[in-house]
Image (cartoon, helix red, strand yellow):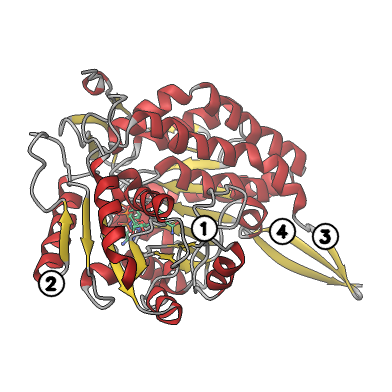
Amino acid sequence: MATTTAQLNRSYSRLFIGGSWVEPEGDRHIQVVNPYTEEPVGTVPSGDSRDVERAVAAAKAAFPAWAQTPLEERLALLSKVGELMAAQSGEIAAVICAELGMPLRLCELIQVGLPTTTFRSMAQVAPQVAWEEQVGNSLVLREPAGVVAAITPWNYPLHQIAAKVAPALAAGCTVVLKPSGVAPLNAFVLAELIEQAGLPKGVFNLVSGGGREVGEALAAHPDVDMVSFTGSTAVGRRVSELAAATVKRVAMELGGKSANVILDDADLGKAVPDGVAKCFLNSGQTCSALTRMLVPRKLLGEVEELAVQAAATYRLGDPFDPQTRMGPVVSADQRQIVRSYIEKGVAEGAKLLCGGAEQPEDQPHGFFVKPTVFSAVAPGMTIAQEEIFGPVLAIIPYDSEEEAVEIANGTIYGLAGGVGSGDVERAKAVARRLRTGQVEINGGAFNPLAPFGGYKQSGNGRELGRHGVEEFTELKALQL
Ligand code: NAP
Protein backbone atom coordinates (compact mmCIF):
# COMPACT_ATOMS: atom_id res chain seq x y z
CA MET A 1 0.00 0.00 0.00
CA ALA A 2 1.31 3.44 -0.93
CA THR A 3 1.93 5.47 2.23
CA THR A 4 3.61 8.78 1.66
CA THR A 5 2.01 10.88 4.38
CA ALA A 6 4.95 10.58 6.73
CA GLN A 7 7.26 12.34 4.26
CA LEU A 8 5.32 15.59 4.27
CA ASN A 9 6.22 18.10 6.93
CA ARG A 10 5.92 21.85 6.66
CA SER A 11 6.87 24.34 9.31
CA TYR A 12 6.39 28.08 9.17
CA SER A 13 7.74 30.38 11.87
CA ARG A 14 6.73 33.76 10.40
CA LEU A 15 3.59 35.66 9.56
CA PHE A 16 3.02 37.49 6.28
CA ILE A 17 2.40 41.17 7.09
CA GLY A 18 2.91 44.25 4.91
CA GLY A 19 4.46 42.22 2.10
CA SER A 20 7.17 40.61 4.28
CA TRP A 21 7.57 37.46 6.31
CA VAL A 22 7.87 38.77 9.86
CA GLU A 23 8.50 37.25 13.26
CA PRO A 24 5.33 37.06 15.37
CA GLU A 25 5.32 39.18 18.53
CA GLY A 26 4.94 36.11 20.74
CA ASP A 27 6.68 32.73 20.63
CA ARG A 28 3.79 30.28 20.63
CA HIS A 29 3.01 28.03 17.72
CA ILE A 30 0.24 25.70 16.57
CA GLN A 31 1.10 22.10 15.80
CA VAL A 32 -0.76 20.64 12.85
CA VAL A 33 -1.61 16.94 13.11
CA ASN A 34 -2.06 14.50 10.26
CA PRO A 35 -5.43 12.85 10.98
CA TYR A 36 -4.38 9.55 9.41
CA THR A 37 -0.98 9.03 11.04
CA GLU A 38 -1.94 11.05 14.16
CA GLU A 39 1.58 12.50 13.90
CA PRO A 40 2.63 16.18 13.55
CA VAL A 41 2.74 17.37 9.95
CA GLY A 42 3.87 20.95 10.50
CA THR A 43 3.69 24.06 12.64
CA VAL A 44 2.57 27.65 12.17
CA PRO A 45 2.89 30.65 14.48
CA SER A 46 0.11 31.27 16.97
CA GLY A 47 -0.18 35.03 16.61
CA ASP A 48 -1.88 37.40 19.02
CA SER A 49 -3.61 40.78 19.13
CA ARG A 50 -0.29 42.62 18.63
CA ASP A 51 0.16 40.84 15.31
CA VAL A 52 -3.42 41.74 14.42
CA GLU A 53 -2.59 45.41 15.10
CA ARG A 54 0.35 45.27 12.69
CA ALA A 55 -1.59 43.42 10.01
CA VAL A 56 -4.62 45.72 10.16
CA ALA A 57 -2.33 48.77 10.00
CA ALA A 58 -0.61 47.32 6.92
CA ALA A 59 -3.95 46.56 5.26
CA LYS A 60 -5.25 50.04 6.08
CA ALA A 61 -2.14 51.70 4.67
CA ALA A 62 -2.33 49.66 1.46
CA PHE A 63 -6.03 50.29 0.90
CA PRO A 64 -6.14 53.72 -0.84
CA ALA A 65 -3.65 52.80 -3.57
CA TRP A 66 -5.10 49.31 -4.14
CA ALA A 67 -8.65 50.66 -4.29
CA GLN A 68 -7.53 53.08 -7.00
CA THR A 69 -5.53 50.53 -8.99
CA PRO A 70 -7.41 49.94 -12.26
CA LEU A 71 -9.64 46.86 -12.13
CA GLU A 72 -7.80 45.18 -15.02
CA GLU A 73 -4.50 45.47 -13.16
CA ARG A 74 -5.96 43.94 -10.01
CA LEU A 75 -7.51 41.14 -12.03
CA ALA A 76 -4.28 40.41 -13.89
CA LEU A 77 -2.51 39.89 -10.56
CA LEU A 78 -5.28 37.59 -9.31
CA SER A 79 -5.14 35.55 -12.52
CA LYS A 80 -1.43 35.18 -11.92
CA VAL A 81 -2.12 33.75 -8.46
CA GLY A 82 -4.52 31.29 -10.14
CA GLU A 83 -1.85 30.27 -12.65
CA LEU A 84 0.76 29.75 -9.94
CA MET A 85 -1.74 27.68 -7.95
CA ALA A 86 -2.51 25.54 -10.98
CA ALA A 87 1.20 24.99 -11.61
CA GLN A 88 1.69 23.70 -8.05
CA SER A 89 -1.60 21.85 -7.71
CA GLY A 90 -0.03 18.46 -6.93
CA GLU A 91 2.10 19.83 -4.14
CA ILE A 92 -0.72 21.91 -2.63
CA ALA A 93 -3.07 18.93 -2.79
CA ALA A 94 -0.52 16.88 -0.84
CA VAL A 95 -0.32 19.56 1.86
CA ILE A 96 -4.10 19.65 2.26
CA CYS A 97 -4.34 15.86 2.12
CA ALA A 98 -1.82 15.63 4.96
CA GLU A 99 -3.45 18.24 7.21
CA LEU A 100 -7.10 17.40 6.47
CA GLY A 101 -7.18 13.70 5.57
CA MET A 102 -9.29 13.92 2.41
CA PRO A 103 -8.14 11.47 -0.30
CA LEU A 104 -5.40 12.98 -2.46
CA ARG A 105 -7.26 12.65 -5.78
CA LEU A 106 -10.22 14.56 -4.35
CA CYS A 107 -7.90 17.15 -2.84
CA GLU A 108 -6.45 17.82 -6.24
CA LEU A 109 -9.85 18.00 -7.90
CA ILE A 110 -11.77 19.93 -5.25
CA GLN A 111 -9.49 21.38 -2.60
CA VAL A 112 -7.10 22.86 -5.17
CA GLY A 113 -9.32 22.84 -8.26
CA LEU A 114 -11.98 25.11 -6.74
CA PRO A 115 -9.69 27.84 -5.38
CA THR A 116 -7.76 27.86 -8.65
CA THR A 117 -11.03 28.36 -10.50
CA THR A 118 -12.04 31.10 -8.08
CA PHE A 119 -8.83 33.08 -8.58
CA ARG A 120 -8.99 32.61 -12.35
CA SER A 121 -12.72 33.41 -12.52
CA MET A 122 -12.25 36.93 -11.18
CA ALA A 123 -11.11 38.17 -14.60
CA GLN A 124 -14.42 36.89 -15.98
CA VAL A 125 -16.90 37.86 -13.24
CA ALA A 126 -15.58 41.13 -11.79
CA PRO A 127 -16.12 43.06 -15.05
CA GLN A 128 -19.79 41.92 -14.92
CA VAL A 129 -20.38 43.95 -11.77
CA ALA A 130 -22.27 47.19 -12.36
CA TRP A 131 -19.47 49.38 -10.98
CA GLU A 132 -21.31 52.49 -12.21
CA GLU A 133 -25.01 52.72 -12.87
CA GLN A 134 -27.25 55.67 -13.74
CA VAL A 135 -30.42 55.74 -11.62
CA GLY A 136 -32.52 58.78 -12.53
CA ASN A 137 -30.40 61.80 -11.66
CA SER A 138 -27.93 59.71 -9.67
CA LEU A 139 -24.73 58.00 -10.62
CA VAL A 140 -24.56 54.93 -8.39
CA LEU A 141 -21.02 53.73 -7.73
CA ARG A 142 -19.85 50.46 -6.26
CA GLU A 143 -16.72 51.04 -4.18
CA PRO A 144 -14.54 48.61 -2.23
CA ALA A 145 -15.74 48.01 1.34
CA GLY A 146 -12.28 48.69 2.83
CA VAL A 147 -10.16 46.51 5.10
CA VAL A 148 -11.60 43.00 5.23
CA ALA A 149 -10.94 40.44 7.97
CA ALA A 150 -11.35 36.94 6.55
CA ILE A 151 -11.83 34.17 9.13
CA THR A 152 -11.99 30.67 7.70
CA PRO A 153 -12.56 27.01 8.72
CA TRP A 154 -10.67 23.80 7.99
CA ASN A 155 -12.99 21.63 5.93
CA TYR A 156 -12.35 23.11 2.46
CA PRO A 157 -9.62 25.37 3.77
CA LEU A 158 -8.10 26.85 0.63
CA HIS A 159 -11.44 27.06 -1.17
CA GLN A 160 -12.98 29.02 1.68
CA ILE A 161 -9.96 31.32 1.80
CA ALA A 162 -10.07 31.88 -1.98
CA ALA A 163 -13.83 32.53 -1.89
CA LYS A 164 -13.07 35.57 0.30
CA VAL A 165 -9.59 36.72 -0.66
CA ALA A 166 -10.00 36.66 -4.46
CA PRO A 167 -13.28 38.65 -4.66
CA ALA A 168 -12.24 41.03 -1.86
CA LEU A 169 -9.02 41.86 -3.67
CA ALA A 170 -10.83 42.04 -7.01
CA ALA A 171 -13.24 44.59 -5.52
CA GLY A 172 -10.31 46.71 -4.32
CA CYS A 173 -10.39 45.75 -0.64
CA THR A 174 -7.31 44.78 1.34
CA VAL A 175 -7.33 41.66 3.50
CA VAL A 176 -6.14 40.21 6.79
CA LEU A 177 -6.65 36.45 6.77
CA LYS A 178 -6.97 34.31 9.89
CA PRO A 179 -7.11 30.69 8.73
CA SER A 180 -8.31 27.74 10.79
CA GLY A 181 -5.76 26.49 13.29
CA VAL A 182 -6.68 22.92 12.39
CA ALA A 183 -5.58 23.08 8.72
CA PRO A 184 -3.55 26.29 8.30
CA LEU A 185 -0.63 25.11 6.15
CA ASN A 186 -2.39 25.77 2.85
CA ALA A 187 -2.87 29.43 3.83
CA PHE A 188 0.90 29.83 4.08
CA VAL A 189 1.30 28.29 0.63
CA LEU A 190 -1.22 30.84 -0.67
CA ALA A 191 0.73 33.71 0.93
CA GLU A 192 3.84 32.44 -0.87
CA LEU A 193 1.95 32.43 -4.18
CA ILE A 194 0.60 35.94 -3.57
CA GLU A 195 4.12 37.14 -2.83
CA GLN A 196 5.39 35.43 -5.99
CA ALA A 197 2.62 36.97 -8.07
CA GLY A 198 3.81 40.41 -6.95
CA LEU A 199 0.76 41.86 -5.24
CA PRO A 200 1.55 45.21 -3.61
CA LYS A 201 2.74 45.20 0.00
CA GLY A 202 0.00 45.09 2.63
CA VAL A 203 -2.79 44.17 0.23
CA PHE A 204 -2.87 40.63 1.66
CA ASN A 205 -1.79 39.79 5.20
CA LEU A 206 -1.79 36.47 7.04
CA VAL A 207 -2.04 36.09 10.81
CA SER A 208 -2.51 32.54 12.06
CA GLY A 209 -3.56 31.95 15.64
CA GLY A 210 -6.41 31.01 17.92
CA GLY A 211 -9.95 32.07 17.14
CA ARG A 212 -10.49 33.56 20.58
CA GLU A 213 -7.40 35.70 20.28
CA VAL A 214 -6.72 36.55 16.63
CA GLY A 215 -10.29 36.04 15.37
CA GLU A 216 -11.88 38.13 18.11
CA ALA A 217 -9.27 40.90 17.80
CA LEU A 218 -10.04 41.15 14.08
CA ALA A 219 -13.81 41.07 14.53
CA ALA A 220 -13.64 43.87 17.10
CA HIS A 221 -10.95 46.02 15.45
CA PRO A 222 -12.18 49.55 14.65
CA ASP A 223 -10.08 49.76 11.48
CA VAL A 224 -11.57 46.60 10.01
CA ASP A 225 -14.49 47.63 7.79
CA MET A 226 -15.91 44.19 7.09
CA VAL A 227 -15.66 40.69 8.51
CA SER A 228 -16.21 37.77 6.20
CA PHE A 229 -16.57 34.64 8.30
CA THR A 230 -17.02 30.99 7.40
CA GLY A 231 -17.47 28.49 10.18
CA SER A 232 -19.94 27.22 12.72
CA THR A 233 -23.15 29.04 13.52
CA ALA A 234 -22.13 29.32 17.18
CA VAL A 235 -18.86 31.14 16.40
CA GLY A 236 -20.62 33.17 13.69
CA ARG A 237 -22.94 34.57 16.36
CA ARG A 238 -19.96 35.57 18.51
CA VAL A 239 -18.18 37.24 15.59
CA SER A 240 -21.39 39.13 14.69
CA GLU A 241 -21.72 40.37 18.27
CA LEU A 242 -18.15 41.65 18.30
CA ALA A 243 -18.53 43.27 14.89
CA ALA A 244 -21.73 45.01 15.97
CA ALA A 245 -19.85 47.29 18.37
CA THR A 246 -18.32 49.13 15.42
CA VAL A 247 -21.25 48.44 13.04
CA LYS A 248 -19.08 46.51 10.61
CA ARG A 249 -20.40 44.85 7.53
CA VAL A 250 -20.62 41.13 8.26
CA ALA A 251 -20.80 38.25 5.80
CA MET A 252 -21.52 34.87 7.35
CA GLU A 253 -21.20 31.42 5.79
CA LEU A 254 -22.33 29.05 8.52
CA GLY A 255 -23.52 25.53 9.17
CA GLY A 256 -26.15 23.42 7.46
CA LYS A 257 -28.43 20.41 7.78
CA SER A 258 -29.46 20.13 4.18
CA ALA A 259 -32.33 17.97 2.95
CA ASN A 260 -32.29 15.80 -0.14
CA VAL A 261 -35.95 15.38 -1.09
CA ILE A 262 -36.39 12.25 -3.18
CA LEU A 263 -39.83 12.31 -4.83
CA ASP A 264 -41.84 9.18 -5.64
CA ASP A 265 -41.04 9.33 -9.37
CA ALA A 266 -37.24 9.59 -8.91
CA ASP A 267 -34.83 7.05 -10.35
CA LEU A 268 -33.82 5.53 -7.03
CA GLY A 269 -30.89 3.63 -8.54
CA LYS A 270 -29.27 6.99 -9.26
CA ALA A 271 -30.77 9.27 -6.62
CA VAL A 272 -29.87 7.17 -3.58
CA PRO A 273 -26.16 6.51 -4.29
CA ASP A 274 -25.77 10.12 -5.41
CA GLY A 275 -27.44 11.29 -2.20
CA VAL A 276 -25.14 9.08 -0.11
CA ALA A 277 -22.13 10.54 -1.96
CA LYS A 278 -23.36 14.09 -1.29
CA CYS A 279 -23.50 13.25 2.41
CA PHE A 280 -20.21 11.38 2.68
CA LEU A 281 -17.92 13.66 0.62
CA ASN A 282 -14.90 14.74 2.68
CA SER A 283 -15.95 12.27 5.41
CA GLY A 284 -19.18 14.22 5.81
CA GLN A 285 -17.30 17.42 6.66
CA THR A 286 -19.05 19.60 4.09
CA CYS A 287 -21.23 22.52 5.11
CA SER A 288 -23.62 21.87 2.21
CA ALA A 289 -23.66 18.07 2.70
CA LEU A 290 -27.07 16.52 2.03
CA THR A 291 -27.27 14.90 5.44
CA ARG A 292 -31.03 14.27 5.53
CA MET A 293 -32.49 12.02 2.86
CA LEU A 294 -36.26 12.47 2.72
CA VAL A 295 -38.02 9.55 1.02
CA PRO A 296 -41.64 8.48 0.41
CA ARG A 297 -42.56 6.02 3.17
CA LYS A 298 -43.71 3.41 0.64
CA LEU A 299 -40.22 3.35 -0.92
CA LEU A 300 -38.33 3.21 2.38
CA GLY A 301 -37.31 -0.47 2.14
CA GLU A 302 -35.87 -0.06 -1.35
CA VAL A 303 -34.05 3.15 -0.38
CA GLU A 304 -32.55 1.51 2.72
CA GLU A 305 -31.15 -1.34 0.65
CA LEU A 306 -29.62 1.00 -1.94
CA ALA A 307 -28.17 3.28 0.73
CA VAL A 308 -26.46 0.39 2.53
CA GLN A 309 -25.05 -0.88 -0.78
CA ALA A 310 -23.73 2.61 -1.56
CA ALA A 311 -22.19 3.02 1.91
CA ALA A 312 -20.37 -0.30 1.50
CA THR A 313 -18.43 1.11 -1.47
CA TYR A 314 -16.60 3.61 0.78
CA ARG A 315 -13.19 2.11 1.27
CA LEU A 316 -11.43 3.69 4.24
CA GLY A 317 -7.67 4.05 4.47
CA ASP A 318 -4.60 6.19 3.90
CA PRO A 319 -5.70 9.37 2.09
CA PHE A 320 -2.55 9.13 -0.03
CA ASP A 321 -3.57 5.65 -1.25
CA PRO A 322 -5.39 5.96 -4.61
CA GLN A 323 -7.76 3.14 -3.55
CA THR A 324 -9.06 5.14 -0.58
CA ARG A 325 -12.49 6.68 -1.03
CA MET A 326 -12.93 8.06 2.49
CA GLY A 327 -10.26 9.33 4.85
CA PRO A 328 -10.48 9.99 8.58
CA VAL A 329 -12.27 13.00 10.03
CA VAL A 330 -9.99 15.90 10.80
CA SER A 331 -9.21 15.42 14.49
CA ALA A 332 -9.74 13.29 17.55
CA ASP A 333 -12.15 15.96 18.86
CA GLN A 334 -14.19 15.88 15.67
CA ARG A 335 -14.33 12.07 15.81
CA GLN A 336 -15.60 12.25 19.37
CA ILE A 337 -18.32 14.73 18.39
CA VAL A 338 -19.47 12.51 15.51
CA ARG A 339 -19.41 9.37 17.65
CA SER A 340 -21.55 11.08 20.28
CA TYR A 341 -24.13 11.94 17.63
CA ILE A 342 -24.19 8.32 16.44
CA GLU A 343 -24.74 7.15 20.01
CA LYS A 344 -27.50 9.72 20.41
CA GLY A 345 -29.17 8.53 17.20
CA VAL A 346 -29.28 4.98 18.57
CA ALA A 347 -30.47 6.18 21.99
CA GLU A 348 -33.28 8.24 20.46
CA GLY A 349 -34.55 5.19 18.54
CA ALA A 350 -33.31 5.69 14.98
CA LYS A 351 -32.63 2.46 13.07
CA LEU A 352 -28.88 1.96 12.51
CA LEU A 353 -28.55 0.35 9.08
CA CYS A 354 -24.75 0.34 8.88
CA GLY A 355 -21.71 1.92 10.50
CA GLY A 356 -21.67 2.85 14.16
CA ALA A 357 -19.64 4.66 16.76
CA GLU A 358 -16.73 2.20 17.07
CA GLN A 359 -13.31 2.53 15.40
CA PRO A 360 -13.43 0.58 12.09
CA GLU A 361 -11.87 -2.88 12.68
CA ASP A 362 -9.42 -2.54 9.76
CA GLN A 363 -8.12 0.93 10.78
CA PRO A 364 -6.00 0.65 13.91
CA HIS A 365 -5.02 4.32 13.78
CA GLY A 366 -6.41 7.50 12.27
CA PHE A 367 -9.48 9.48 13.33
CA PHE A 368 -11.90 7.30 11.39
CA VAL A 369 -15.65 7.14 11.62
CA LYS A 370 -17.47 4.30 9.90
CA PRO A 371 -19.76 5.37 7.04
CA THR A 372 -23.03 5.38 8.96
CA VAL A 373 -26.62 5.28 7.75
CA PHE A 374 -29.66 5.67 9.99
CA SER A 375 -33.22 5.05 8.84
CA ALA A 376 -36.65 5.65 10.36
CA VAL A 377 -35.32 8.96 11.64
CA ALA A 378 -38.02 11.27 12.99
CA PRO A 379 -37.69 14.94 11.94
CA GLY A 380 -37.34 16.12 15.55
CA MET A 381 -34.49 13.76 16.53
CA THR A 382 -31.12 15.31 17.35
CA ILE A 383 -29.45 13.65 14.34
CA ALA A 384 -32.13 15.21 12.10
CA GLN A 385 -31.72 18.70 13.55
CA GLU A 386 -28.05 19.27 14.39
CA GLU A 387 -25.05 19.51 12.12
CA ILE A 388 -22.95 16.38 12.76
CA PHE A 389 -20.03 17.07 10.38
CA GLY A 390 -19.16 13.42 9.88
CA PRO A 391 -20.20 10.58 7.54
CA VAL A 392 -23.66 10.08 9.03
CA LEU A 393 -26.79 10.00 6.86
CA ALA A 394 -30.31 10.28 8.31
CA ILE A 395 -33.07 8.76 6.16
CA ILE A 396 -36.42 10.33 7.05
CA PRO A 397 -39.68 8.93 5.64
CA TYR A 398 -42.55 11.22 4.61
CA ASP A 399 -46.15 10.66 3.57
CA SER A 400 -46.85 13.57 1.20
CA GLU A 401 -44.96 16.14 -0.84
CA GLU A 402 -46.37 18.82 1.45
CA GLU A 403 -44.92 17.04 4.47
CA ALA A 404 -41.56 16.59 2.70
CA VAL A 405 -41.28 20.37 2.17
CA GLU A 406 -42.25 21.00 5.78
CA ILE A 407 -39.61 18.58 7.08
CA ALA A 408 -36.97 19.96 4.69
CA ASN A 409 -37.61 23.49 5.99
CA GLY A 410 -37.91 22.35 9.59
CA THR A 411 -34.44 23.13 10.93
CA ILE A 412 -32.68 26.35 11.93
CA TYR A 413 -30.49 26.01 8.82
CA GLY A 414 -30.99 26.80 5.13
CA LEU A 415 -27.75 26.32 3.24
CA ALA A 416 -28.31 23.73 0.51
CA GLY A 417 -30.67 20.99 -0.61
CA GLY A 418 -31.51 18.53 -3.33
CA VAL A 419 -34.62 17.35 -5.13
CA GLY A 420 -34.81 14.13 -7.14
CA SER A 421 -37.65 13.49 -9.58
CA GLY A 422 -38.33 12.00 -13.01
CA ASP A 423 -40.01 15.30 -13.86
CA VAL A 424 -37.61 18.27 -13.75
CA GLU A 425 -40.47 20.81 -13.61
CA ARG A 426 -41.94 19.04 -10.60
CA ALA A 427 -38.49 19.02 -8.95
CA LYS A 428 -38.05 22.74 -9.66
CA ALA A 429 -41.45 23.51 -8.14
CA VAL A 430 -40.43 21.73 -4.91
CA ALA A 431 -36.99 23.38 -4.99
CA ARG A 432 -38.62 26.83 -5.11
CA ARG A 433 -40.37 26.02 -1.83
CA LEU A 434 -37.14 25.15 0.02
CA ARG A 435 -35.87 27.98 2.24
CA THR A 436 -32.25 27.46 1.31
CA GLY A 437 -29.50 29.14 -0.72
CA GLN A 438 -28.81 26.33 -3.21
CA VAL A 439 -30.74 23.33 -4.45
CA GLU A 440 -29.39 20.68 -6.77
CA ILE A 441 -31.92 19.06 -9.07
CA ASN A 442 -31.25 15.38 -9.81
CA GLY A 443 -27.65 15.74 -8.66
CA GLY A 444 -26.96 18.94 -10.65
CA ALA A 445 -23.25 19.81 -10.48
CA PHE A 446 -21.78 22.42 -8.14
CA ASN A 447 -21.30 25.65 -10.07
CA PRO A 448 -18.35 27.75 -8.84
CA LEU A 449 -19.77 30.86 -10.53
CA ALA A 450 -23.22 30.66 -8.91
CA PRO A 451 -23.91 32.48 -5.61
CA PHE A 452 -23.30 30.30 -2.54
CA GLY A 453 -24.65 31.07 0.91
CA GLY A 454 -27.40 30.47 3.37
CA TYR A 455 -30.89 31.39 4.49
CA LYS A 456 -31.83 31.49 8.17
CA GLN A 457 -29.01 30.52 10.56
CA SER A 458 -26.82 29.27 7.71
CA GLY A 459 -25.65 32.82 7.22
CA ASN A 460 -25.88 36.19 5.52
CA GLY A 461 -24.54 37.12 2.13
CA ARG A 462 -23.27 35.18 -0.85
CA GLU A 463 -19.87 34.06 -2.07
CA LEU A 464 -18.49 33.14 -5.52
CA GLY A 465 -19.05 34.55 -8.98
CA ARG A 466 -20.25 38.10 -9.64
CA HIS A 467 -22.41 38.11 -6.50
CA GLY A 468 -19.35 37.22 -4.44
CA VAL A 469 -17.49 40.29 -5.71
CA GLU A 470 -20.49 42.55 -5.02
CA GLU A 471 -20.42 41.32 -1.42
CA PHE A 472 -17.20 43.28 -0.87
CA THR A 473 -18.53 46.60 -2.16
CA GLU A 474 -20.32 49.63 -0.75
CA LEU A 475 -22.79 51.67 -2.77
CA LYS A 476 -22.41 55.41 -3.21
CA ALA A 477 -24.94 57.62 -4.99
CA LEU A 478 -23.79 60.85 -6.64
CA GLN A 479 -26.80 63.10 -7.17
CA LEU A 480 -26.34 65.03 -10.40
P1 NAP B 1 -15.41 27.16 13.70
O1 NAP B 1 -15.00 26.42 14.90
O2 NAP B 1 -16.59 28.04 13.77
O3 NAP B 1 -14.12 28.01 13.26
C1 NAP B 1 -14.10 28.79 12.11
C2 NAP B 1 -13.01 29.85 12.24
O4 NAP B 1 -13.38 30.75 13.31
C3 NAP B 1 -11.65 29.29 12.61
O5 NAP B 1 -10.66 30.05 11.97
C4 NAP B 1 -11.62 29.49 14.12
O6 NAP B 1 -10.33 29.57 14.66
C5 NAP B 1 -12.31 30.82 14.24
N1 NAP B 1 -12.84 31.09 15.56
C6 NAP B 1 -13.12 30.22 16.57
N2 NAP B 1 -13.59 30.88 17.65
C7 NAP B 1 -13.62 32.19 17.32
C8 NAP B 1 -14.00 33.37 18.01
N3 NAP B 1 -14.47 33.33 19.26
N4 NAP B 1 -13.90 34.56 17.36
C9 NAP B 1 -13.45 34.63 16.09
N5 NAP B 1 -13.05 33.54 15.39
C10 NAP B 1 -13.13 32.33 16.00
O7 NAP B 1 -15.68 26.20 12.46
P2 NAP B 1 -14.80 24.98 11.96
O8 NAP B 1 -14.94 23.88 12.93
O9 NAP B 1 -13.44 25.47 11.60
O10 NAP B 1 -15.55 24.62 10.58
C11 NAP B 1 -16.67 23.84 10.52
C12 NAP B 1 -17.93 24.69 10.47
O11 NAP B 1 -17.86 25.59 9.36
C13 NAP B 1 -19.18 23.88 10.23
O12 NAP B 1 -20.21 24.37 11.05
C14 NAP B 1 -19.50 24.13 8.77
O13 NAP B 1 -20.85 23.96 8.43
C15 NAP B 1 -19.08 25.54 8.62
N6 NAP B 1 -18.83 25.84 7.20
C16 NAP B 1 -19.70 26.64 6.52
C17 NAP B 1 -19.48 26.89 5.18
C18 NAP B 1 -20.40 27.76 4.38
O14 NAP B 1 -20.00 28.20 3.31
N7 NAP B 1 -21.61 28.03 4.83
C19 NAP B 1 -18.39 26.34 4.54
C20 NAP B 1 -17.55 25.52 5.27
C21 NAP B 1 -17.75 25.29 6.61
P3 NAP B 1 -9.62 28.27 15.31
O15 NAP B 1 -9.16 27.47 14.18
O16 NAP B 1 -8.54 28.81 16.11
O17 NAP B 1 -10.68 27.57 16.10
At label 1, which amino acid type do we have?
Glu
Q: State the residue at coordinates (58%, 38%).
A: 117
Crowd class of label 2 (few under 14; some 14 to 19; many from 20; radius 10 Å): some
| Residue 374 position within the rendered picture, expressed as x and y whole percent measured from the top left | 21, 61
Q: Can residue 264 be seen in this view?
A: yes
Q: State the residue at coordinates (45%, 38%).
A: 110
Kindly report which numbered mark, 4 or 2, lies closer to the viewer in this rendering. Answer: 2
Disc marking residue 440: 1
Quadrant in which ligand 1 is drawn: bottom left
Cα gap from disc 4 to disc 3, whole angstroms = 9 Å
Instruction: Report whether the residue tagged 4 is closer than 8 Å to ligand 1.
Output: no
Secondary structure type for disc 3? strand
At label 4, which amino acid type do we have?
Glu
Proximity of marks 4 and 3: CB atoms separated by less than 8 Å: no
Proximity of marks 4 and 1: CB atoms separated by less than 8 Å: no
Cα gap from disc 4 to disc 1, whole angstroms = 33 Å
At label 3, which amino acid type do we have?
Glu
Secondary structure type for disc 2? loop
| Residue 61 position within the rendered picture, expressed as x and y whole percent measured from the top left | 59, 47
Query: Image quadrant for the N terminus?
Result: top left
Q: State the residue position of label 3.
A: 132
Disc marking residue 377: none
Chain-order first, disc 2 or disc 3: 3
Chain-order first, disc 4 or disc 2: 4
Secondary structure type for disc 4? strand
Crowd class of label 4 (few under 14; some 14 to 19; many from 20; radius 10 Å): some
Q: State the residue position of label 2.
A: 349
As drawn, 368 above or below 301: above
Disc marking residue 143: 4
